[in-house]
Amino acid sequence: MKIALVCPYDYAYPGGVAAHVSQLEYHFTRMGHCVKILAPYSGNKDVLGDNGIVASSRVTPIPAGGSISRISLSPLLPSRVKTLLRGENFDIVHIHEPVVPLLSVAAVYFSKSVNVGTFHACHNTPRGYHFCHPFLKGAFERLDGKIAVSQPARDFVAKYLPGEYHIIPNGVDFEHFAADVLPIEEFCDGKLNILFVGRLEKRKGLDYLLGAYGRVKRQFPNTRLIVVGPGTKLRRNYAEKISRMKLKDVVFAGRVSYADLPRYYHAADIFCTPATGEESFGIILLEAMAAGKPVIASNISGYASVVSDGIEGLLVPPKDEEALAQAIISLFSDATLRQQMGARGRAKAEEYRWERVARMVLNYYSELLVSSPRRASCG
């Protein structure tokens, strides 16, 4: 098959959708398919590789869902997309977040191939979906197939764009995170380590974890909180809170390379992600589970679709520092339970291997190529 994978977000900047697209491209190519990635890209074009097509190098940061979406709003983008798609003659054009302006919508409208859309988001409020519904409906109706990465993602988008959705989850690079690597040496000093991985954004809930950690530290003084992830503005706020609370042993590691990230997971005794919402799935949960770590997460729909409470970890009410602290204390108090949850988590994470997920997507493509009235002629 000749496949185009369309990512509306800056491919030079780390993010869940870009990582998803990257993994599909890697596994599709290994399976013998011809794959191109169409995305805005603000970085060095040489790094993008032969399979990348730069739709635009102009990227605009837009606040969205408690985060920042880096998309292209270049007025030249639609005509460029039209030319690129018509010239390549793809069998499948797979658009991720197909109603995100400008790239995704342009790809849907100008594609003459079989169009597949994957919906990743799960917001607490309708935001642009409700306001732009008449315009988005036109793009939506040009999709031959629709994928949601989880039931929460499906439930969210179906409120505004009803239809039949095929649920295919995100995957995890299982071998990468399950690999027997050396943990970060400085954290192997006998302290019990809590690990947080995520951008330093309010919705990720680090503020609540710091509050909970203050309670944990009183009962388990020989502990450490390791914070991995980019962000500068809120980091200053967190530093002020740490100072006010007189907390010790909080380490901000900043942005960590993908190669080194498993070493941080393997240094942890517990992985904790207390996000307050806006999560359709739990990729970082799968990473920690692949590393064999018990997890503590907010009981929000996106996380509850990955972790079973009391099996692979513990789910606590969002924004509840006391419940979060008690969950951490209960796992710190029981090394056997931590080991059992970690083992069950690793077994579950293996079900989400990217090669398995990629095969599911390919099988869906094959079904659509047979059933869709709009098909490219190339093989």
Image (spheres, rainbow, N blue to C red):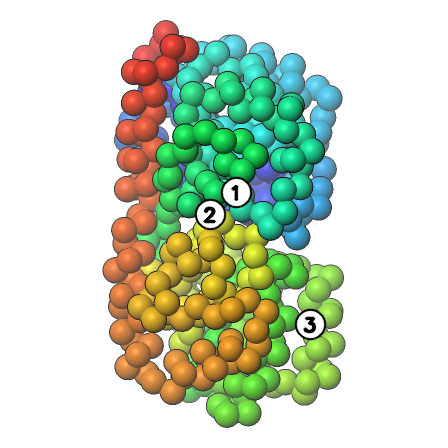
Where residue 137 sits, quadrant-wise, is top right
Residue 120 higher or lower than 214, as above or below: above
The first of marks 3 and 2 along the sequence is 2
Please tell me how crowded label 1 is: few (under 14), some (14-19), or many (20+) other residues with Cα within 10 Å: many
**CA distance for labels 3 and 2:** 30 Å
Where residue 147 sits, quadrant-wise, is top left
**CA distance for labels 1 and 3:** 32 Å
Say which element carries label 1.
Answer: helix
Tell me what residue is drawn at x 40 percent, y 40 percent. Answer: 23
Label 2 near label 1: C-beta < 8 Å? yes
**CA distance for labels 1 and 2:** 6 Å
- In the displayed structure image, the side of residue 296 where residue 79 appears, left or right: right
The amino acid beneath tag 3 is Tyr
Identify the residue position indicated by label 2 in the image. 152
Quadrant for the N terminus, please.
top left
Say which element carries label 2.
Answer: helix
Q: Which of the two marks, 1 or 3, is nearer to us in this view? A: 1
Identify the residue position indicated by label 3 in the image. 238
Identify the residue position indicated by label 1 in the image. 156
Residue 198 higher or lower than 208, as above or below: above
The amino acid beneath tag 2 is Pro
Please tell me how crowded label 2 is: few (under 14), some (14-19), or many (20+) other residues with Cα within 10 Å: many
Provide residue 367's location: percent of width, then percent of height. 29, 22
- In the displayed structure image, the side of residue 124 where residue 344 appears, left or right: left
